[in-house]
Image (spheres, rainbow, N blue to C red):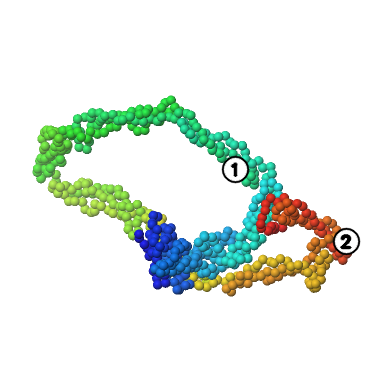
Amino acid sequence: MTRHSFVNSPELPAISLPAANHHQQPLPTNNLAFSPLAILRIRSACRCLSALHRKDPHWHPLPTSILSDLLTPPEFTATPKQQPLKEAVLRFYKLKQLLTKCVRCFTEFNTEAGECGREIGEVDKDDCCQNPHYGYKEADGECHFCGPPVWSPWSAWSRCNVLCGEGVRQKTRKCFGINNSGCHKISDNLQMEPCNGTCCGDKGWGSWLPWSACSVTCGGVGSRMRQRVCNSLPACRFACSGESEQTERCESKNQCPVHGGWSRWSNWAECSGSCVNNQGSSVVMPSRARQRSCSNPAPSTDTQPHGQSCPGDGSQRQDCSELPNCPVNGNWGAWSSPGPCSVTCGEGLQLSNRKCENPTPKYGGKYCEGPSTKTSVCQSPCPVHGFWSGWSSWSECLATCIPQGKMPTRTRKRLCSNPAPSTNPRGQPCQGEANQVENCASLPHCPVNGAWGSWSPYSACPVTCGVGLMMSTRKCNNPPQKYGGSSCPGEERQTKICSTNLHCPVNGVWSEWSDWSNCKDPFRKDRVIRCKPAGGSQNRERKCLHRAYNGSFCIGEDLSQTRVCYDVSDCRVIETQPLKGTWGEWGQWNFCKPACGESSKRIRFGFSGRDETYDPAKMAMIYHWSQERKCNVLWESKARLWSNT
């Protein structure tokens, strides 16, 4: 069994790991057993090991093939010989605790969606959160915020939990922050309010539509389907429960068509000739044929639809290449051009010849009949000097475009044939060039594909706190892209992580306002003003939280607020004399208490109005009345109910 060394350092004893094999045998008790999946993960790199080494110099630099979520080691009683193995396992778990601090760091965090953006790489969690605007992801894949606690916006109201009648609906929000200990109250992240179901007369499902055609049309069992439509309004779609489709078996009693099949091939017929007629480039090859019929079986004609005919051809033909070649008789070729004149001047004879090669006799054929030479009368002219014919048209350019650094050309020529110089006696040749060459300057330039230049030095670290990205760029100018050529492939910039080892300032964040204090006399704390027409005061406070690392103080100056109040809780009406006034409006119904059960009730209050002649000195109490009614609560919650009203 092949083994791979995991760690070799004075601080961490070497441990052998088995090769990844799905069929490996159990290891002896003096070795650690890792699954193949664990071995693959152990070999994956962790990019922040160097940062962990800086935080714990006692640990020597380790190879990057180390897993942060190591498996639980097998439990066994260590003998003296196995004691080094047990110590190595404990060091593995110390390494695991360090590796769990390795996170993916992001420079952006969306507090509305709770999502991270613009990843800069894997760094130590503490280094990433030196900037309170950053976010990070751990092994669970969830995005976390480095800054102080902050609430997301409220979600939309959920739909009412009943179709018809009184119910409740809720909305939620989330708290993000590196220390969100103050965000765990259900009252802060959950709100509820009464609602009325409006789907009392909902139609629900419509009737089932007719069954579809059977999936088979002949000789067998298939399936068919039918559907129904939810006729509810869009807001009441959830009233349609159950399936919208049904499927059942169906059987077709029709006879299936029988498709045709070929019979066996017949024997080959006799060849169409006794020899191969090979006449130079033209070869006539005899052939032979054989047939087959579409009768095994024949396609059915008494079914609907009819059976398909046999695919392919009903006959085949092949050359009889084994036959001998037919005899080829010889035939004279063309006469050659007349030879030189027999005299240098005046009338003479010229000799022409021909060969028996059109075709040459072969395969036992006959030789050509007749003479192989002939003569003709000739006259030797006087010397004739050559003169040029007109120039030919310019040829096509050697290229369709002008390449980089080289100009394509085209040519034209003329012949010394107007007249040609005599050869016997020899005349003088034409004077001048027979060919001309010129540049094809009117062609378009060939496309020049761009190529990258050298990388620039890395830029300075762009941040003064936390971690950031340094950038190096290159230009597509070696050569630059021209004349429609393709641009340089690849990236024009590369980055690497830089760390300032300084924590960014964390600005203060206001806490929520505290509840209003009890209504008290502002001058005499022991004076009772409950149910009296005497004004009091009450206050509330807030704190500036989470400010650190020289961050700015919270925006705004108010640490507390004070307002005028009247203590009229649970007061009854006692009129010392008639008061002029009008009935006020009823207030909102409170939530049901308790949240469920037959004894659940809700209450609302009302207060009297007054006219312009109202005199507080003439009354001992303020008008106050209430109503209550029994609740019909269909939903039970263990959370406290809250409302915006």
Q: Is residue 374 left or right of residue 49?
A: left
Q: How many marks?
A: 2
The mark found on residue 242 in the picture is 1
Q: Nearer the viewer, residue 20 or 146?
A: 20
358 horizontally vs 454: left or right = left
Instruction: Categorize mark 1 by other alpha carbons within 10 Å: few (<14), some (14-19), many (20+).
Output: few
Gap in angstroms between the C-alphas marked 1 and 2: 63 Å
Label 2 belongs to which residue?
Answer: 575
- At a point 51% along the width and 67% down the height, the residue shown is 125
Determine whether 384 is above or below 584 in the image: above
Please tell me which residue lies in front, 497 or 104.
104
Image quarter hosting the N terminus: bottom left
Q: In this rendering, is residue 629 above or below 556? A: above
User: Which residue occupies the extreme top position in the image?
Assistant: 302
Q: Nearer the viewer, residue 481 or 313?
A: 313
**Position in image of residue 506 (x %, y %):** 58, 70
Which residue is at 16% across, 49% downward?
A: 427
Report the amino acid beneath label 1. Answer: Gly
Q: Find residue 505 and report its horizontal and vertical position in percent.
A: 57, 71
Q: Quadrant of residue 87?
A: bottom left
Disc 2 is placed on an element classified as loop
Measured as percent of width and height from the top left, residue 14 is found at: 39, 68
What's under tag 2, amino acid-wise? Glu
Evaluate whether residue 198 shows in this view.
no
Is residue 311 shown to the viewer in this render? yes
Residue 92 point in image, percent of width and height: 45, 67
How many residues crowd around disc 2 within 10 Å: few (fewer than 14), some, or many (20 or more)?
A: few
Query: SS class of the residue under badge 1?
Result: loop
Mark sitting earlier along the chain (1/2) = 1
Q: Quadrant of residue 244?
A: top right
Quadrant containing the C terminus is bottom right
